[in-house]
Image (cartoon, rainbow, N blue to C red):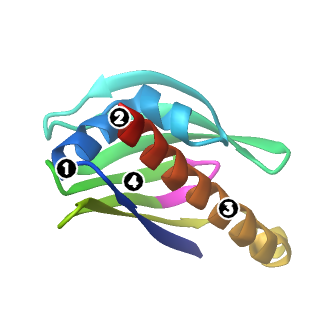
Amino acid sequence: MVAVSDGIAIDAPPETVFEYLDEPANHRTITPAITGISDIEPLDNGGKELDFTYRMVAVEVEGHLVQTVHEPPTCHRFAMDGGLSGELTFDIETTDDGSWVTYTAEYTIPGQVIAKVIEPFVRRYNKGELESTLANLKAKIEAA
């Protein structure tokens, strides 16, 4: 299992951050490796279910997300299956200056042998993607 996590301070209240992350199209804007989002459906818990395409290095991976936790304004959590399986979480905490957002991704790479060989590279690549996503989130929200 690959697990990466990072956080960033954002000069905006948690409600603003939560609302921005609640719109699937915004994830495509802030996450460089997302190349497509489709078939968005609302869920009874207030969250969403959707299909996505993610470019991992030079390979496009298709997947499906189901939002298992939708707790305004503190948490978005998604179960992920398809080319990658695991969980994605955005935790949002109140700070004196706005919000602290922690983004955590935990997933398995398909294929045992290939996974062991490429896992360290994928971990570094996705850590960079996670950092870019958080920096883009901060820039978009603080510019608004």
Residue at the disc numbered 1: 13
How far apart marks 4 and 1 lie (CA) works out to 26 Å
Residue at the disc numbered 2: 49
Say which residue appears at 67% left-offset and 62% top-offset: 128
- The amino acid pointed to by label 4 is Ala
Q: Decide: marks 3, 4 in contact (CB < 8 A)? A: no
Determine which of the numbered discs, if any, sits on residue 48 in the image: none
Specify the principal SS of the magenta part.
Answer: strand
Instruction: Residue 83: give x, y in percent of width and height.
Output: 64, 48
Residue at the disc numbered 3: 128
Q: Quadrant of residue 61?
A: top right
Magenta highlight range = 82-86
- The amino acid pointed to by label 2 is Glu
Residue at the disc numbered 4: 79
Q: Earlier in the sequence, mark 3 or mark 1?
A: 1
Q: Quadrant of the N terminus?
A: bottom right
Instruction: Residue 81: give x, y in percent of width and height.
Output: 51, 50
Tag 3 secondary structure: helix
Q: Is residue 22 visible?
A: yes
